Amino acid sequence: MGCFFSRRRKPAQGGQQQQAAAAGQDSAAGEEKAPQYSWDQRPKIDPKDYTFSGLKDETVGRLPGKVAGQQFVIQDCENCSIYIFDHSATITIDDCVNCRIFLGPVKGSVFFRDCKDCKCIVACQQFRTRDCRKLEVFLCCATQPIIESSTGMKFGCFQYYYPELALQFKDAGLSIFNNTWSNIHDFTPVSGENNWGLLPENAVVQDHVPLPASEELKAVRISTDAMRSIVPVTRGRRQKSSDESCLAVFFAGDYTTANARKLIDEMTGKGFQLVQTKEVLMKAEDAHRVFQQRASEFIPLLEKGPVVALEFSGDGAVEGCQSTVNDVFSGTKVFVSESKASASQDVDNFYNFADMQMGM
């Protein structure tokens, strides 16, 4: 073995012929098939396909399947209607004025910066605003929403449906039952002022973000009926109309989501209010804390996956929930508060545990 600067020995004539032949074979092999790598086979991403920038008085959007989990950027738009009918990784919205915006499920964060007079419908893991003014947002957010240096902010519960939306929530890793839309943290509060509030309970989604008018986007079969919303419409932190609450908990199985939705429909149909929902994993020690004396009934069910909890409010909520579960879910194991006296403690025990589990 010689060093880099050593003189190369001249090969014998026969050796030269063998090397030439080998080189010819290598060259032919290279021409026949170049090596293929997995990154060479990925489709090329053009950032322009995932950006709306500098638009004015336009209606634009992306149909289901056209974003497919990529990042998206919206910036410098004025008086536009913007619809992202797909799931994405993250979305930033910068310097937009007087826009109507729908954002399908976002796996990570949605960040509004330097925007004003915008009306939005958003589903995401994290929601944040900075230096914004007068935003109205129908929100589904898995973690506590944060506003910073923002004023005149109004929030309502996400309510929207189109056929592809449920699968998009799953693709984005979001649960339709984890929605802290009204639990806002103001990072820069002002003494004596409130930088945010809640939209009226009877606010109509289409009055804020109308259905798209363009022919292409009309193909998406949208409903803003609260009864059809993929995300259950909850009261959040609005004042309850009754001091009686009831906790119902479904355990993991093939029909957990469908059963939870059925109970919501039954209870709200009887005039009770859905206050909040949560989907979370539990361990045996958590069950003892939440279910107390009845924990042993439910601990074997916890290994199958996360539980879905629902809080209902209204006079007679406990009795109404118990009778509904007995009538409709007779073959399903469901935890329901046993009495009005214990129900408020059940609710506090479960949601205090869930908030700690999710780092709220």
Image (cartoon, rainbow, N blue to C red):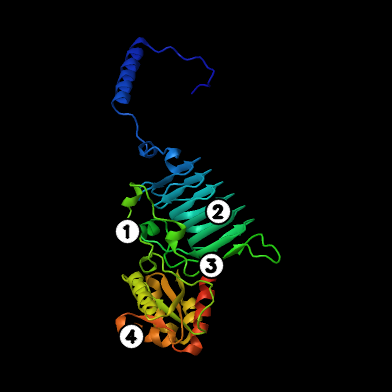
Q: Is there any visible trace of residue 112 in the rendered image?
A: yes
Sequence-wise, the earlier of marks 2 and 3 is 2
Quarter of the figure that contains the C terminus:
bottom right
C-alpha distance separating marks 1 and 4:
31 Å
Disc 3 or disc 4, which is closer to the eye? 3
* Residue at the top extreme, as displayed: 13
Helix, strand or loop under label 3 = loop
Are circles 4 and 2 on residues that touch, CB within 8 Å? no
Helix, strand or loop under label 1 = loop
The percent coordinates of residue 54 (x first, y second) are 51, 40
Disc 2 packing (10 Å; few <14; some 14–19; many ≥20): some
Residue 117 - label? 2
Residue flagged by tag 2: what amino acid is it?
Answer: Asp
C-alpha distance separating marks 3 and 1:
26 Å
Residue flagged by tag 4: what amino acid is it?
Answer: Asn
The percent coordinates of residue 177 (x first, y second) are 43, 68
Q: Which residue is mark 3?
A: 182
Sequence-wise, the earlier of marks 1 and 4 is 1
Residue at 49% over, 63% down: 142
Disc 4 or disc 2, which is closer to the eye? 2
Q: Which residue is mark 4?
A: 326
C-alpha distance separating marks 2 and 3:
20 Å
Disc 1 packing (10 Å; few <14; some 14–19; many ≥20): few
Q: Which residue is mark 1?
A: 163
Sequence-wise, the earlier of marks 2 and 1 is 2
Disc 2 or disc 3, which is closer to the eye? 2
Disc 3 packing (10 Å; few <14; some 14–19; many ≥20): many
